[in-house]
């Protein structure tokens, strides 16, 4: 199983939130798809990963298939991630079908395949404001 490390609000699977769009393209090449999403972010879709940037080039979200999430020394299988987040993050909330964890800086759909979105800290107010 693929295990992806998350350092909340700092890095996901070794990719720092300080990465800019130009650096991403230099590292991975051009994405398979590039589009604007409903949240007014530019998505770079590489198939295995999706990166979302503000117009300024600031990285907002990183989404990857994550069968196992590594949080420090804790390995959490995706199938248990929902119950783990609900037990460990009293501030967790649901928006647009996603379970969002402010403590761990992530969002995911518990009943869907194992895609996890790591969030930059400044994204949390936007997630809180959705679907209200």
Image: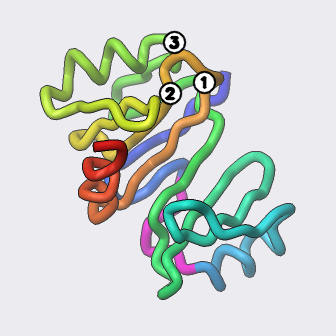
* Residue 105 vertical position relative to residue 101 in the rendered view, above or below: below
* Residue 97 placement (x, y as % from top left): 46, 29
Measured from the top left, where is residue 29 in percent x and y?
Answer: 82, 73
Using the image as rendered, state which of residue 36 and residue 23 is in the foreground: 36
Q: Residue at x 31, y 17 (%)?
A: 84
Tags 1 and 2 in contact by the CB under 8 Å rule?
A: no
The N terminus - image quarter = top right
* Residue depicted at 49% across the width and 76% down the height: 54
Residue 76 in magenta? no
Q: Which mark is residue 4?
A: none
Q: Calculate the distance from the C-alpha at mark 2 to the C-alpha at mark 3.
A: 11 Å
Residue that extends furthest to the front in the rendered view of this protein: 132
What segment is highlighted magenta in the picture?
14-20
Residue plotted at (75% across, 46% down): 48
Q: CA distance from mark 1 to mark 3?
A: 8 Å
Residue 74, position as x, y percentages in the image: 35, 24
Q: Of marks 2 and 3, which one's residue comes earlier in the chain?
A: 3
Q: Which circle marks residue 79 in the picture?
A: 3
On screen, residue 63 above or below 1: below
Foreground tag (1 vs 2): 2
Does 89 sit left or right of 114 as displayed? left
Judged from the image, the secondary structure of the residue bearing numbered disc 3 is helix
Displayed quadrant of residue 37: bottom right
Residue that mark 1 sits on:
67
Q: In the image, which disc is placed on residue 109?
A: 2
User: Is residue 26 positioned above or below 7 on the image?
Assistant: below
- Name the image quarter holding residue 34: bottom right
| SS for callout 2 | loop
Image side of residue 76 versus residue 44, left or right: left
Report the predominant secondary structure element of the magenta stretch: loop
Residues at discs 1 and 3 in contact (Cβ within 8 Å) = no
Circle 2/circle 3 CB separation < 8 Å: no
């Amino acid at each position: 199983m693929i295990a992806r490390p998350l350092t909340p609000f700092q890095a996901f699977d070794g990719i720092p939130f300080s990465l800019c769009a130009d650096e991403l393209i230099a590292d991975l090449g051009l994405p398979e798809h590039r589009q604007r999403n409903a949240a007014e972010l530019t998505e770079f879709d590489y198939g295995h990963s999706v990166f979302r940037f503000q117009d300024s080039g600031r990285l907002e979200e990183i989404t990857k298939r994550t069968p196992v999430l590594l949080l420090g020394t804790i390995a959490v299988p995706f199938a248990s991630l929902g119950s783990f987040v609900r037990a460990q993050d009293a501030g967790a909330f649901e928006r647009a079908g996603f379970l969002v964890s402010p403590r761990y800086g992530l969002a995911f759909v518990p009943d869907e395949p194992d895609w996890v979105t790591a969030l930059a800290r400044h994204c949390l107010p936007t997630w809180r404001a959705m679907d209200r």
